[in-house]
Structures are given as C-alpha cells and as structure tokens.
Image (spheres, helix red, strand yellow):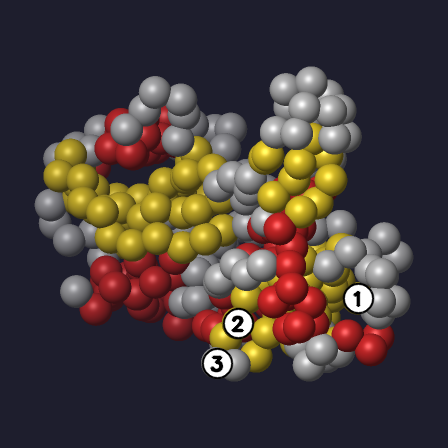
Amino acid sequence: MNRVGREQAAAHWAGSKVLQIWRSQILVEAGAIRLLSPENFDPSVEKFYIGEVNGQHYFAVNIEIAEGSGSSLREIVSNVDSQLLEVAVTALALVNWHETHSHCPRCGSKTTVIENGWVRECVADGTHHFPRTDPAIIVAVQDRNGRLCLGRQAVWPENRYSNFAGFVEPGESLEQTVIREVFEESGLKVTDIKYLKSQPWPFPNSIMLAFEAFTDEPESSKPDGVEIVDLKWFSKTELLDAIKDGSLNIPPKSTVSGKMIEAWLNG
C-alpha cells in the first residue's frame, strides 16, 4: 500500500472502491467483501486512503451503523484473492488504530486525522502519532524424527489445531520470544530457530513472524492447560490422513500458519 498527499487522495476518490469497516469487521455481501463506489457516501465522510492495486484505488470508511452483514476477516480470508486481501488487511488495521487513538497518549487531548488517515495530530501540543504494528511470532515445532507438533487453544473446536504463537514482549529478541512462547504453551525446549516468512495480521494490529524450531525432547510436551489444552504430534502421513478424514481442522492455506504447515508437508 502506498501513501499520497491530500490533493492526490482527493483526486483518487472518484472512481475508487470503498471498504466499509464496522466494529472491527469488514462488511460483506454474498460471502465476498463489499466494495462500494464513492457515490454511496456523503462527500464529507471521513475516509482513509488505503492505496492502489493494479490501477484501482481503495479507501476505507469506518461506519457506526451497518447496512448488511459484517464478517471477521478470519472467516472470509480463504475466499479473498491475495491482492484484495492486502487491501482489506491494511484497511482493517488502519481503522482499528484510529478506533483506539482518538486522544493523545502524551497529554490526553483529542487528536485529529491528517495525511489521509495515516497520521493523527494532537490538538493541544501538535505532536504527530502514527499507526503501530505489534510483532508476534508463530512457530512450526518439529522433532528430529520428522514430526510436527500442533496445539489446540481452549476457545477452539475440538478438532482445530495450529502452530504455537504469541506476542513479543519488551526487551526480547524474536528468538527469545520463540523459546519462551513454545516452552510456556507446550513445555518444549527448542533450538535451531530459523525465520521463514511474515504476514500482516490485523487482530487488532499485528504482524505474524513465522519461524521453525526443533526439539530434542518431544516426550516432554505438555499443554499449559490455559491457552493450549491439547497437543498432538503428527508425521506427514498422519497429518494428511487426519485432514482427509475430517478429524483435524487446520488453518486455511491463505494464512501464514496454513502456509507453514503446507511447506512442512511438501518439504
């Protein structure tokens, strides 16, 4: 996504496509993201310029009353093409940031929107505040026998399993976060940590940094009983069989976790 000046953004408004965000949900229609034209909005509506993709400009509008159904991006991510998904992720992350930064963190005064939604300015001291992204790690934990360990969160259905994940804490390196999070959630000590890829994850404003790591003591795995309530080790054949017979539900391939599992299966 790219940022432009006010005059450029105003010129891009005509002919653009507009995403509507309502209570951290994207409005959808027939299972797809609803894209409206500027004619559907009052000219004075507060709008945020998201960027341009293949010559098409996109804006986001945060609405208070939804006309239609809203959906979590998690629910429709597998049905959205990669380019529109990039637009949607940016729109949702930006709107979520505005929702929680209406006042200055320095003095508590109100802030106003400038730079087409990419900056908020304090009305009292003039300081500028910018969107922030919280780093989080996600880890494909393997043993030396070619198996992958997946965990089930307490809030998930009984057959849903995924990789281990958590936020980076102040003062930590990414590698330290991998070691801490995996041990806290699974009781496993890991080494040979390797970075894989990343994916923006606007729930509400994160970026997922993917790693693989190995343990020499798979028998020591034990869920923490709070976040993770069950752990399972899979060989590639076992994982494919479980997916096929429906006993295992893993994240869709459009998510970084799904891509990690797919890469492991094909490795």
Left or right: 24 as drawn, with respect to 229: right
Tally the marks: 3
Q: Is residue 138 left or right of residue 116?
A: left
Place of residue 241 in the rendered image (x, y in percent of width and height, measured from the top left)? 33, 68
* Residue highlighted by disc 1: 69
x and y, in percent, of residue 240 in the image: 31, 68
Callout 1: helix, strand or loop? strand
Distance between mark 1 and mark 3 Cα atoms: 28 Å
The residue drawn where x is 28% and y is 28% is 173
Residue 153 visible in the displayed image: no
* Residue at x 11% of width, y 45% of height: 144
Residue at figure coordinates x 34%, y 20% from the top left = 171
Circle 2 packing at 10 Å, graded few (<14), some (14-19), many (20+), is some
Q: Disc 3 designates what residue?
A: 54
To which quarter of the image does residue 216 belong? Answer: top left
Q: Type of residue at label 2? A: Glu
Q: Nearer the viewer, mark 1 or mark 3?
A: 3
Please state which of residues 33 and 14 is positioned toward the viewer in this rendering. 14
Amino acid marked by disc 3: Asn
Quadrant position of the C terminus in the picture? bottom left
Q: Which comes before the other along the chain, label 1 or label 3?
A: 3
Relative to the observer, which residue lies in front, 1 or 211? 1
Q: Is residue 172 visible from the viewing direction of this image?
A: yes
Q: Are marks 3 and 2 in contact (CB under 8 Å)?
A: yes
Out of 138 and 88, give the one closest to the viewer. 88
Mark 1 vs 2, N-terminal side = 2
In space, the residues marked 3 and 2 are separated at their CA atoms by: 7 Å
Q: Which residue is mark 2?
A: 52
Q: Position of residue 179 (x, y in %)?
A: 26, 29
- Helix, strand or loop status at disc 3: loop
| Identity, as a three-letter code, of the amino acid under mark 1 | Ser
Relative to 79, residue 110 above or below: above
